[in-house]
Amino acid sequence: MLVDDQSLFTESLCTFLNNYAEDMTVVSKAGNGLEAVKFCDIEHPDIILMDINMPQMNGIEAVKIIKSKHPEIKIIMLSTYDEDAYVREALLSGASGYLLKDLSPTELIMSIRALKSGVLQISPSIVQKMIQAQFVGDEKKAGDEAEGGKAGGEKGDAGGSESQIKAAEKQFEWLKTLTRREREIFALIATGHDNDEIAEELDLALQTVRNQVSTIYSKLGVKDRFEIIKLANKV
């Protein structure tokens, strides 16, 4: 099912999928979240491509309702917005992915097919942005602690319990071991890029990429790219 209030976009995407993806059939099209919820009860699609901002009911609200009624349906958000708030809310609501509309039709088809593996489908630029944001937050926090000393620890639990804060920090402790360049490579690995593609994307020598990947594996204690992807899905 295709869900978007821009009918021209929906029609174009429908034509492409029906003509070039032999293993896919568009069973219905909806112009807003409310229609999507209604059509799901009738059509029972396997996969939904869902926009975010739509009239009557937005995509995130529709995801919550659809997943509560039909948990087996996989939903990929297909949007022009890459803000962290949209991405996190969509994924927490049950979406199986978040892709930007600037990806190529071929990449979209590959992402839809990859859902069978159970791997979250997220645009590479979004993954990299989320990882960078996590590091910026860590660096800012470290700087604030260095300036404030013990004073910052005397404010009590106004912003949340100390145990909750420590638990959150521990969850992403592995991120702090990577350099900025290693983070970039990590993000590309997490979104399915092989070494040749990473070298081309970052304008690096192939052997340099191989060395960096080995270093990342060693630092994170992982043995393959699948484990990298599982770590990325926790960000």
Image: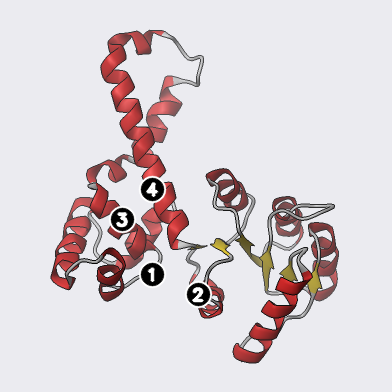
Element class at badge 3: helix
Q: Which of 43/28 is in front?
A: 28
Q: Is residue 171 above or below residue 228?
A: above
Badge 3 amino acid: Glu
176 in relation to 139, above or below: below
Q: Which residue, given by chain and number where applicable, does mark 4 sit on?
A: 131
Instruction: Rate crowding at label 3 as few (under 14), some (14 to 19) or many (20 or more) other CA atoms within 10 Å.
Output: many
**For mark 1, what is the residue?**
192
Relative image position of residue 213 (x, y in whole percent)? 21, 62
Task: Report which quarter residue 229 is drawn in.
Answer: bottom left
Question: Label 2 amino acid?
Answer: Ala
The disc, 1 or 3, on the residue closer to the chain's N-terminal end is 3
Point out which mark residue 119 bears: none
| Alpha carbon separation for disc pair 2 and 3 | 22 Å
State the separation of the CA atoms marked 3 and 4: 9 Å
Q: Which residue is mark 3?
A: 184
> Which image quarter is the N terminus in?
bottom right
Is any atom of residue 47 visible in this view?
yes
CB contact under 8 Å: marks 1 and 2:
yes
Q: As shown in the figure, which amino acid type bears the numbered disc 4? A: Ile
Element marked by disc 4 = helix
Disc 2: which residue: 114
SS at circle 2: helix
**Mark 4 or mark 1, which has the lower sequence index?**
4
Q: Earlier in the sequence, mark 1 or mark 2?
A: 2
